[in-house]
């Protein structure tokens, strides 16, 4: 779940439940990832999440 309490309302979000990009807080916090600075970046949210997960896994293996 995203902590978006300080995110501006003019941010982009990726709704992982619907697969849609949203401008502003339209969905429940548990259904979205972000905030992102642009629509293009929000569209890449699944790719970004996969990359971050891979990096975290690699860090854990290194420890």
Image (spheres, grey):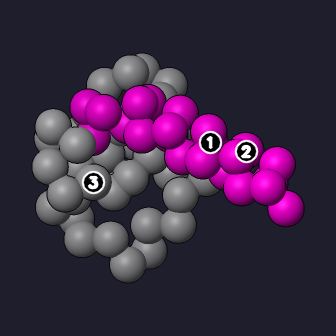
Q: Which mark is residue 28?
A: none
Q: Residue furthest front?
A: 62
For the stretch drawn in magenta, what is the main secondary structure? helix
Q: Which residue is mark 1?
A: 53
Bin the neighbour count of mark 3 within 10 Å (Cα to Cα): few under 14, some 14-19, many 20 and up: some
Q: Which mark is residue 57?
A: 2
Which residue lies most toward the bottom here? Answer: 6
Q: Is residue 52 above or below residue 14?
A: below
Q: Are marks 2 and 1 in contact (CB under 8 Å)?
A: yes
C-alpha separation, residue under disc 2 versus residue under disc 1: 6 Å
Q: Is residue 28 magenta?
A: no
The reply to whether residue 28 is visible in this rendering is no
Assign a secondary structure to mark 1: helix
Q: Residue 36: x percent and y percent?
A: 27, 54
Residue 12 x/y as whole percent: 23, 49
Using the numbered discs, state the Cα–Cα distance from disc 3 to disc 1 in whole angstroms: 18 Å
Residue position for label 3: 36
Q: Residue drawn at (53%, 66%), measured in percent from left and top?
A: 3
> Which circle's residue, 3 or 2, is located before the other in the chain?
3
Q: Look at the image and give the residue range highlighted in magenta.
A: 42-63
Left or right: 57 as drawn, with respect to 6: right
Residue at 27% over, 40% down: 42
Q: How many marks?
A: 3
Is 39 above or below relative to 46? below
Q: Residue at x 50, y 51 (%)?
A: 29
Closer to us: 57 or 49:
57
**Label 2 CA crowd tier, 10 Å (few <14, some 14–19, many 20+):** few
Q: Is residue 57 magenta?
A: yes
Residue 2 visible in the shown view? yes
Tell me the CA gap for discs 3 and 2: 23 Å
């Amino acid at each position: 779940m995203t902590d978006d309490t300080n995110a501006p309302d003019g941010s982009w979000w990726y709704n992982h439940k619907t697969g849609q990009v949203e401008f502003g807080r339209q969905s429940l916090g548990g259904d979205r990832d972000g905030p992102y600075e642009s629509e293009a970046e929000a569209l890449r949210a699944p790719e970004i999440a996969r990359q971050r997960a891979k990096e975290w896994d690699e860090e854990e293996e290194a420890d």
